[in-house]
Image: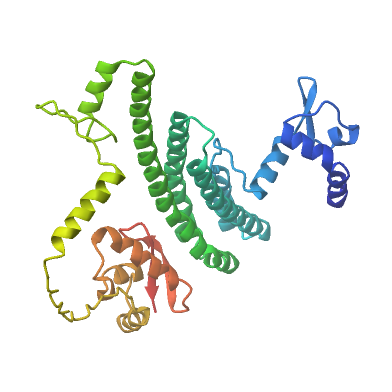
Amino acid sequence: MKHLELVNLVNDNKDLIDRAYREGRVQNVDEVLADSTLFVKISGSYKLNKNYLNFVDSVLQRVDYSIIFGDYEKEYKELVKNKNRFLENANEHYKKQILDLIENLFFKFFNRDREIQVLLLRVEHDTSLDIDILIQNANDILEKIDELIEANTKIGQLFRVDLKELDDEIDTLLSSISVDILRYIQNIDTYIKQISQFLIQTKNRRLQNKKLTKLANLILEEKTLELDEYLSVHKKHLFHTIVKNQKNKIVTYPSDRDIYKINKAVKVVLDGFEVKKKLKTSLMKPQQKQKLDIINIDNILKDLSDAKCEDIFVFIHEHKELSMYEDYKLKEEAFKLFLQITTHERLHFKDEFNEFGIKVAKWE
């Protein structure tokens, strides 16, 4: 079957396929649909093929809680294998395999970033699930996001170092996707903070719900003494609670009529007083200057040209333009600048790696 024939088959049976998608299963389908593997027979009825459902949910951005955020091990192993074969025999077949695998990994990073965004939005706005299940789902997502960090490290090392200078066409592809790949990797930190904040808020909401449930049960069961004790103990945390008074006095709020009488009486008393308004003098405060951390890459390039250093990343890491960054942020900012100049014609990579695990590049 050709692709166009498949498109026509889906269009001709769109109502049946849509019903199976919404209801989960149908009783009967045409033989041609079963032969195309769009439908699979299970327990006497037909269900849509999981591969088709994955495609539809991805396009419609309907991500399941149980989603696994990509398995990169297969592409990683194939890339390493084809790289070694290409080094032994510079055959175009192995180069094409490498280019295809790099593109596959890029699509996985792209789809994964979008799917995580949709999944987090769904978790944060889902009101149909029990609060304990929401917390469990959020913890599962956080665990899976943490697992991505190790995969990001391996793929990043492969792209930045192992495949560098293997072939001009490969270098061009890696340079074209490097900025996007870096952004997808950095987004992981944002997602971890977002889901962690959601967990804190949801657990607080669960605790408050338990308190309200206990209070409601005491009221329904008319346990007056226990209710009085509970409200007295939790007066700082619950509204409309009772504050015990040693004089056994009952404090009530005034009515609107009482407030009106008090206002009228106070106004009569105050009408005989004249109060002069104090003139306000405004002081002009000097405008504060804000320091902006702007890195001038032209200065770094000029110093590189003058110094002709043996390791560009180390040179950038120690450059005065980055002196405003703390140690924990310095390596990340230095690597961003390093990526921006990797395609410069005067930059040449060596075979060894520096103390940061980054391939040594020389400026000539």
Residue 118 at least partly seen: yes
Q: How many marks?
A: 0
The structure residue drawn at horizontal position 86% and vertical position 36%, both measured from the top left corner, is 33
Q: Is residue 62 left or right of residue 161?
A: right
Q: Position of residue 342 (x, y in %)?
A: 45, 71
> Is residue 233 or residue 199 the one in the foreground?
233
Q: In the picture shown, does residue 262 fall above or below 204?
A: below
**In-image side of 122 versus 91 (left or right):** left
**Which residue is at a point 86% across and 27% down the rendered structure image?**
28
Q: Position of residue 163 (x, y in %)?
A: 51, 59
Q: Please identify the quarter of the rendering in which residue 290 is found.
A: bottom left
Instruction: Look at 52% across and 39% down and name the residue there.
Output: 126
Quarter of the image with the N terminus in it = top right
Instruction: Find residue 170 and report its image quarter.
Output: bottom right
Q: Position of residue 257 (x, y in %)?
A: 29, 45
Along the viewing direction, whichever of 189 and 336 lies nearer the viewer: 189
Residue 361: x and y in percent read 39, 69
Can the viewer see residue 49 in this picture? no
Which quadrant is home to the C terminus? bottom left
Q: How is the image coloured?
A: rainbow
Say which of 165 and 118 sits in front: 118
**Residue 155 vs residue 293: left or right?**
right
Quarter occupied by residue 168: bottom right
